Image (spheres, helix red, strand yellow):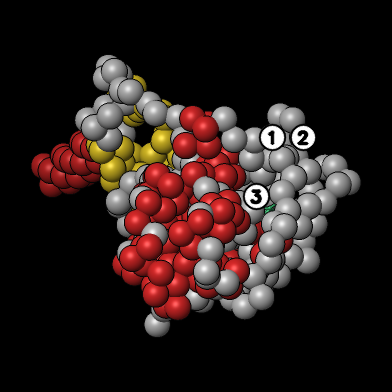
């Protein structure tokens, strides 16, 4: 009898112990959110909208229900992590500013990969922040207007050759000039300059390439090259000719509400090697398109993903498809 009692007691102890451990575990895990990744056609991120208070850590456990995805938060330095089927990846992030952030998939998981986004609302006091509108908006540029370069260079403009004119060009080399003028406008300004009357059209195009090159550092260009390979090449092509692997996909026009494509119209990715199109585009215009995306086309909006610096670097990188690069 005594022995049986002791046994029952032991079982109760064990059970009780187990229960309290379970309870402690649950309390500890309370604010951990399990975030499921699925290809956009199968639902994308679940949940797709997260909320956390400012300065409070957001604990996520990431897992995939189909293929490998990646997870990153836009405009953040925190590196992307892989999200694998059958595995849990812990990810913790703390926001020190209230606002809305975008998280997104970083691995090409299918034709709709870039639609795989979600939002994190960070609640708390919003500090008064002066938000400067992007340059294209400040300039009142109509970024959707049709453009066509009238004067096409015979040879690919070379910054190296253009450096010969460096001494006669100081006025045109400022960052604000570079960002607000298309290569063609810059060329025209040079052509109209009586001081430069003795130079040939091609020499002035080389000078335009030189002005471009002086407004981007090799480091920034290298970072942009990587961003382009990861985020843009699948549509615009490795060589910028618009012939990426997803070129064959139908670029369908989105509905006004931004729903998944259902329309019949298609728009193909822009060919960045086309001088008729690209030499008439100012950096401010390309920046605007990258920030905003192509209204209703397959061009994603990147404003919420990249920092301003990254977008300017990408813009400068796009001209490498027009100008010769200095080795
Ligand atoms: C899912 C496919 C897709 C991806 C990914 C994509 N684009 Fe595009 N992009 C397009 C399409 C389609 C257009 C044409 C849209 C339009 O004309 O409005 C376009 C247009 C543009 C334009 C406008 C060019 C012009 O002459 O008006 C720029 C600039 C651009 N993309 C840059 C980028 C950059 C930079 C990235 C990567 C960060 C990128 N795109 C990623 C599909 C894509
Ligand atoms: Cu994905």
Which quadrant: the C terminus? bottom left
Percent x, y of residue 115:
61, 47
Q: Pointer 3: what residue? A: 299
Q: Please state which of the two labelled residues, at mark 1 or mark 3, is closer to the viewer.
A: 3
Q: Which of marks 1 and 3 is nearer the N terminus?
A: 1
Question: Could you classify mark 3 by the number of other residues whose Cα lies within 10 Å: few (under 14), some (14-19), or many (20 or more)?
Answer: many
Q: Is residue 146 visible?
A: yes
Question: Could you classify mark 2 by the number of other residues whose Cα lies within 10 Å: few (under 14), some (14-19), or many (20 or more)?
Answer: some
Q: Is residue 72 visible?
A: no
- The quadrant of the picture showing ligand 1 is bottom right
Q: Pointer 1: what residue? A: 258
What mark, if any, has residue 255 been given in the picture?
2
Q: Which of marks 2 and 3 is nearer the N terminus?
A: 2
Task: Confirm or reject: label 3 Cβ below 8 Å from ligand 1.
Answer: yes
Q: Nearer the viewer, residue 133 or 275?
A: 275
Q: In this view, does 100 lie above or below 18?
A: above
Labels 1 & 3 near each other (Cβ < 8 A): no
Q: Nearer the viewer, residue 112 or 290?
A: 290
Q: Is residue 125 above or below residue 101?
A: above
Labels 2 & 1 near each other (Cβ < 8 A): yes
Q: Is residue 58 left or right of residue 272?
A: left
Quote the CA–CA distance across marks 1 and 3: 12 Å
């Amino acid at each position: 009898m005594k022995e049986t009692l002791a046994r029952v007691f032991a079982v109760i102890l064990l059970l009780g112990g187990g229960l309290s451990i379970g309870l402690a575990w649950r309390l500890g895990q309370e604010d951990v959110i399990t975030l499921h990744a699925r290809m956009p056609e199968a639902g994308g991120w679940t949940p797709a909208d997260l909320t956390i208070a400012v300065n409070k850590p957001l604990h996520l456990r990431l897992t995939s229900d189909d293929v490998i995805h990646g997870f990153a938060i836009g405009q953040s330095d925190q590196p992307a992590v892989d999200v694998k089927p059958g595995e849990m990846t812990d990810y913790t992030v703390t926001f020190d500013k209230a606002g809305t952030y975008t998280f997104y998939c970083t691995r090409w998981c299918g034709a709709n990969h870039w639609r795989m986004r979600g939002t994190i609302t960070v609640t708390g006091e919003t500090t008064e922040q002066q938000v400067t509108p992007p340059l294209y908006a400040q300039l009142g540029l109509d970024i959707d207007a049709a453009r066509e370069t009238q004067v096409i260079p015979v040879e690919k403009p070379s910054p190296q050759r253009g450096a010969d004119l460096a001494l006669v060009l100081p006025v045109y080399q400022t960052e604000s000039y570079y960002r607000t003028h298309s290569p063609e406008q810059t060329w025209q300004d040079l052509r109209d300059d009586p001081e430069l009357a003795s130079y040939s059209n091609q020499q002035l195009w080389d000078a335009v390439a030189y002005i471009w090159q002086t407004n981007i550092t090799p480091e920034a260009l290298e970072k942009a090259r990587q961003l382009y390979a990861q985020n843009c090449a699948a549509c615009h092509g490795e060589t910028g000719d618009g012939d990426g692997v997803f070129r064959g996909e139908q670029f369908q026009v989105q509905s006004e509400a931004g729903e998944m494509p259902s329309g019949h119209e298609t728009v193909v990715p822009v060919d960045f090697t086309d001088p008729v199109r690209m030499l008439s585009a100012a950096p401010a215009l390309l920046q605007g398109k990258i920030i905003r995306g192509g209204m209703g086309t397959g061009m994603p909006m990147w404003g919420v993903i990249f920092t301003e610096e990254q977008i300017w670097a990408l813009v400068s990188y796009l001209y490498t498809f027009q100008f010769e690069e200095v080795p």
